[in-house]
Amino acid sequence: MLELYDKTKTLEMRKKLIGQSCRLFFSEDPIKIVRARGQYLYDENGVEYLDCISNVQHVGHCHPLVTKAAAAQMELLNANSRFLHDNIVHYATRLAATLPPKLSVFYFVNSGSEANDLALRLARQHTQNEDVVVLDHAYHGHLTSLIDISPYKFRKLGRQKEWVHVAPLPDTYRGEFRETHPDPAQAYADTVKEVIDQVHSKGRKVAAFFAESLPSVGGQIIMPYGYCSKVAEYVHAVGGVYVADEVQTGFGRVGSHYWAFQLQGEAFCPDIVTMGKPMGNGHPLACVVTTAEIAKAFTDNGVEYFNTFGGNPVSCAVGLAVLDVIEKENLMANALRVGGHLKELLTELQSRHAMMGDVRGVGLFLGFELVKDQTERTPATEEAAHMVKKERQICVSTDGPWESVVKFKPPMCFSMVDAERVVGNIDEILFHEVTVIKSTSCRSRNIW
Ligand SMILES: Cc1ncc(COP(=O)(O)O)c(C=O)c1O
């Protein structure tokens, strides 16, 4: 048995041994979580925390069906995907059933970053072009290639590669074209077209447009309906492909559909979809799915794609168990019902608190934006950070370009009672504790 350290010792050793760029939640006084179940986390003293942020533990922390499936397969066999095994084909078949028929070829990997990196390779191989258009504030992963296409990161580093081009976030609350615009989908899609035209005017060519189906780091943004189809049309016209990053948004989180890109209607289908986080409920499992045509171009380059751990029998058993739980426990219906209730309760708060600027989202992908004033919509960054109230034992995170969006992406078993509890707390905090702070200096990401 490993020695159990007290919290102070764990923190001290972590500081010494682990790179300090790997940050902790509640960095001033972190919580030490020793076990979890469903949507609840427990610290070393048995104190319970309501988890509104773990979209990875999609069907609930430590779901018994998932842990049993992992243990059973682990006892039997875990080998790499160069050996024939049924799990990988069973799993690909089940995933294919959730996707449009055009998306039919799968590559299994270990993280969202690996998935996006592979998507980039597929796009470039297929198009023979190099450049990428991304949305402002996007984050697509931690590999070098992905920091390059993540404005959220490369802006902090002060470098932008010549092959990367940034289009505005289609944000109808704070962007250039707002909710009163007659056709924000067309207007924002046209901004992508302008970027593409600029790329061409420099003699360069676009391999891919990369976007989350609902930009999360950008602040839980809901793309205007029709935007993705129009962008795909512009990207295809110049020989590029559309990559939908569903690493945060997939697997039924939006409730009405399995994939968030499907919110854009049946006419829209990306050329490549990447998935990760919720896929293995905490087990490192991620995937890229694409068309037969793109996959063929990748095969035709003659270079084997080998991923040591990707698609192994244990990962696939875990993935299959996650799909089973989503279905058996009607978690998509739960996301619709509970998410809808949570959104309604948050919307009610708007009439009582002037700081509640915008409430948005679908299913259990929700957020509300704090503003200093309703007219200018000045982001209330410090106020959002001030909401950090760990003693209330509710974990929520802030995000968006100004860290002014409080967001919810809880395990999909989140309940009506949880929703009511969390909104009751927000109401109290806004009523008693948070008033507009004059200075607007930005604080880093926080949870409360
Ligand atoms: C939208 C999106 N894409 C990709 C990634 C990278 O995934 P991973 O951390 O599994 O490499 C993340 C991680 O936060 C993400 O939010």
Image (spheres, rainbow, N blue to C red):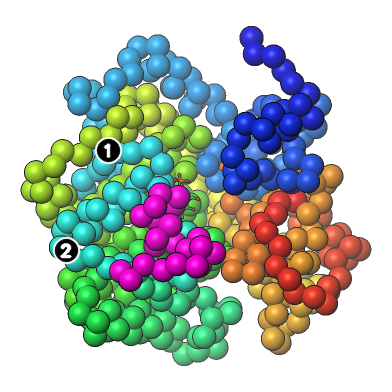
Residue name at image x 55 percent, y 29 percent: 63
Residue name at image x 85 percent, y 66 percent: 434
Q: Is mark 2 within 8 Å of ligand 1?
A: no
Observer-side mark, 1 or 2, equals: 2
Residue name at image x 28 percent, y 71 percent: 232
In the image shown, does 348 or 426 lie closer to the viewer? Answer: 426
Residue 266 x/y as whole percent: 31, 65
Mark 2: amino acid: Thr
Q: Is residue 131 above or below residue 12?
A: below
Side of 135 where 219 appears, left or right: right
Q: Secondary structure at mark 1?
A: helix
Q: Is mark 1 within 8 Å of ligand 1?
A: no
Residue 175 x/y as whole percent: 54, 81
Mark 1 burial class by Cα count in 10 Å: few <14, some 14-19, many 20+: many
Q: Earlier in the sequence, mark 1 or mark 2?
A: 1
Disc 2 target residue: 127
Residue 237 in sight in this render: yes
Mark 1: amino acid: Ala
Mark 2 burial class by Cα count in 10 Å: few <14, some 14-19, many 20+: some
Magenta segment boundaries in residue numbering = 141-163
Residue name at image x 85 percent, y 60 percent: 429
Could you tell me how far apart the alpha carbons at marks 1 and 2 are, in whole angstroms?
A: 25 Å
The quarter of the rendered structure image containing the N terminus is: top right
Residue 99 x/y as whole percent: 30, 51
In the image shown, does 378 or 257 lie closer to the viewer? Answer: 378
Q: Is residue 351 above or below residue 414?
A: below
Side of 276 where 443 appears, left or right: right
Q: Which mark is on residue 92?
A: 1
Q: Is residue 146 magenta?
A: yes
Q: Which mark is on residue 289?
A: none
Residue 202 x/y as whole percent: 24, 82
Q: Is residue 144 above or below residue 47?
A: below
